[in-house]
Amino acid sequence: MIFGRKTRDTQRTAFPKATSQQDPPKDTTAATSKTTDKSKPLSSKGASDAYKKAVEESYTTGLRDVRTTTLFRVTNFELFVKPNVIVMGLERKLHVGTKLGAMGEHITLNTGAKMPLIGLGTFQTKGEDIVHKTIESILKNGYRSIDTAGGYKNEADIGNSLKELLPKYDLTRKDLFITSKLPPKDQGYDNCRTSCMTSLENLQMEYLDLYLIHWPGTQKMKHDDVRNVQNRKESWMQMETLLKEGKLKSIGVSNYTLNHMEELLSFCTIKPAVLQIEHHPHLVQKELVEFCRDNDIHFQAYSSLGTMMEDNKLLNDPLVVEIANCYTKTPAQILLKWAVQQHIGVIPKSTNPVHIAANIDIFDFELSSLDLQRLTELDKQHHYCWNPITIV
């Protein structure tokens, strides 16, 4: 993320009576569910024709999947009686997976490097004690990817924490995927090298797994100033040099629009491995996602949970809450799963141990194709963070 207002870690649970993300109330629908004849799905009084049809199709597909795989053992089907959760209730029964750690779910970049789909975002995570406790919490919960930036002013604390904690958890530098970013004030050929070397020194590392240009513009430069174009080009050329020297394993960009990406591909000799940008159901970056897939560039999302302010319209979106209740998950878990299930990386920021544990606990279920689509249709093209569209 780029710089913004001071915020709070304000993830909320899906359930009104829950005390944390980790302990939602028991699923009371189980008491009202019914066992059905396998020859046809249960019809629910009051359900719309559209939902009945969806249930019929989901049931048929699910039954076929169960019959052709040894991964599932289903003796009966239980459907929730409430019409608005019938489909999700059924598919949640069918789509049961094996819980995996963050390193068990990764994407292979165009450099050949394996990047975890879930990492820790560290925007506004400051203070030696807070950083240390946060790093220990993520290592304990299986995170192996950390996203920081020169502008976050926390690289030194992260480096110190890792130096102390890696041996404790029997880990080495090679077990981690570390991302940092070039601050907007350091755009340009020489400045980029100096800034990158400073990040390496602060993190106490010989290389970075990924280094990103944080912002397409230069700090204190007007958005329509054409020098922005030249500065970011020079930064990229220096990053290619640093990659060849082994200081960087992969390089990419953050907050680039489609125009910025097309410009970059017009001159680069090493293709970017990653584009990191704001992305969530209220801001579905369809064109950018498709562009990245067409050009073998990994699309990584930040601000997957919307704003970190208490009045979070995304976490509190009625549809997100409804779907979360259907899967007995939190809204945050649903939003992260929506991205990860589409092979989009996420870097949720948190210093709360409960939220840290919950954010990575999303590999034991799958969203139905219907729910994926319903969430995607929430798109409002609304930015909760900075919009780079005006940068020339």
Image (cartoon, grey):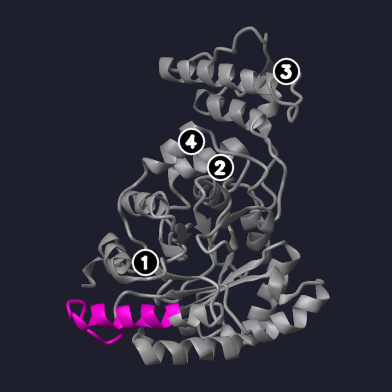
Closer to viewer: mark 2 or mark 3? 3
Task: Name the foreground residue: 104 vs 244.
Answer: 244
Foreground mark, 2 or 4, reads 4
Residues shaded magenta: 218-240
Q: If you read the primary sequence from the N terminus, does the residue marked by circle 2 or circle 3 appear first?
A: 3
Q: Residues within 10 Å of mark 4 (few under 14, many from 20)?
A: some
Residue bearing the label numbered 2: 324
Q: CA distance from mark 2 to mark 4?
A: 10 Å
Chain-order first, disc 1 or disc 4: 4
Image: 71 above or below 141: above
Q: Amino acid at mark 1?
A: Cys
Label 4 sits on residue: 371
Secondary structure at numbered mark 4: helix
| Label 3 – label 1 distance at C-alpha | 47 Å
> Comparing marks 2 and 1, which lies closer to the viewer?
1
Q: CA distance from mark 2 to mark 1?
A: 24 Å
* Contact check, label 3 and label 4, Cβ < 8 Å: no
Sequence-wise first label, 2 or 1: 2
